[in-house]
Amino acid sequence: MASLRDIKKRIDSTTKMKKITKAMEMVSAAKMNKAEQNAKAFVPYSEKMQEVVASIAKHTDADHPMLKTREVKKVGYIAITADSGLAGAYNANILRNLNHAIQDNHNSTDEYTVIAIGRMAVDFCKKRNFPIARSITGLPDQPAFATIKDIASETVQMYSDGEIDRLVIIYNHYVSAISQVVTTKQLLPIEDMNNSGSSSQYEYEPSEEQILAVLLPQYAESLIYGALLDAKASEHAARMTAMRSASDNASELIDDLSLSYNRARQAAITQEITEIIGGASALE
């Protein structure tokens, strides 16, 4: 049985740990609120962009390689993870889906490549020798579009240049503070244009082909950025939930240790009283 001193040390260390996890929970909650606002604020822009592009694609004879399905020889996977842990299963779920997608659909590293966003994705791919075409780490908690514009445009250009024939993104979709869903979505070629867009008619200047040549890459880049904002909100929510669970577990552990401490202390006092009584009886 542990001594009173050992139990007291464990109580003190667990109490200090609880203070840390509680503080991290509060920080993550504040970051989550801001990230959620950013993700929701970006939705109207993304929807309007999709509406305009879909209208051009549906109501004109304009064509673009990003709208065409071609033979898939190589797939690009964008994996969005965090730069650190302490977020429950947030990173593990994304990386598990990435690994399953690669193992189930490819027999050689020549058939796929990874665009890794976040240190956890980069480290995961390096350990398993997955080919990494592009990577970025150290993103801020509230990333601006300029932060990821280069990697987004380079990734879209990989498709335009024929380096990859399909682009898939894997990230955590933010549903609520306690619910995040791992989402796997095809970005390129764009397949949902026939099911979106309004019936509005636009007059185009210059031609439809020239407009699509500019708008479609921007639209694809906006989808990547929107997914990143969504993923950031999910990351902060997952970390907040994980730290809350850690604080609750610390409270339970402190209660159990306090009970053990009181029992051990009572046993020690009882033992001392018994020894005093025994010594007094021996002197009589």
Image (tube, rainbow, N blue to C red):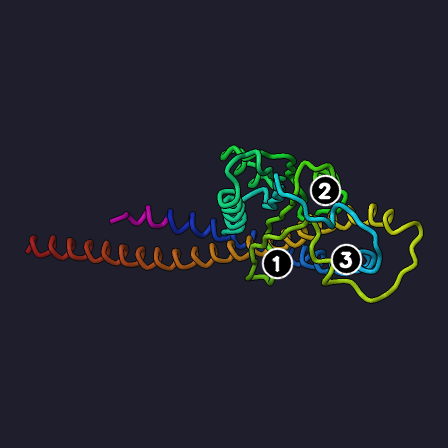
Residue at the image point whose x is 55% and y is 53% from the top: 239
- Report helix, strand or loop for mark 1: strand
Q: Are marks 2 and 3 in contact (CB under 8 Å)?
A: no
Q: Nearer the viewer, mark 3 or mark 1?
A: 3
Kind of residue sitting beneath label 2: Val
Q: Is residue 265 left or right of residue 187?
A: left
State the separation of the CA atoms marked 2 and 3. 16 Å
The residue pinned by badge 3 equals 50
Q: Magenta part of the protein: which range? A: 1-8
Q: Position of residue 111 (x, y in %)?
A: 57, 37
Tell me the mark number nearer the camera, choosing from 2 and 1.
2
Tell me which numbered mark, 2 or 1, is placed earlier along the sequence.
2
Pointer 3 local density, CA inside 10 Å: few below 14, some 14–19, many at least 20:
many
Kindly report the secondary structure that dominates the magenta region of the rendered protein.
helix
**Residue that mark 1 sits on:** 174
Looking at this view, name the residue that lies furthest to the bottom: 199
Q: Where does the image place residue 138, in percent across and percent down from the top left?
A: 65, 39
In the image, 37 versus 190, the foreground residue is: 190
Question: Whole-percent x and y of residue 180?
Answer: 57, 58
* Numbered badge on residue 18: none
Q: CA distance from mark 2 to mark 1?
A: 24 Å
Among the two numbered marks 2 and 3 on one chain, the one whose residue lies closer to the N terminus: 3
Q: Residue at x 38, y 59 (%)?
A: 255
Tag 1: residue type?
A: Tyr
Residue identifier under label 2: 156
Give the mark, 3 or 1, whose residue is nearer the N terminus. Answer: 3
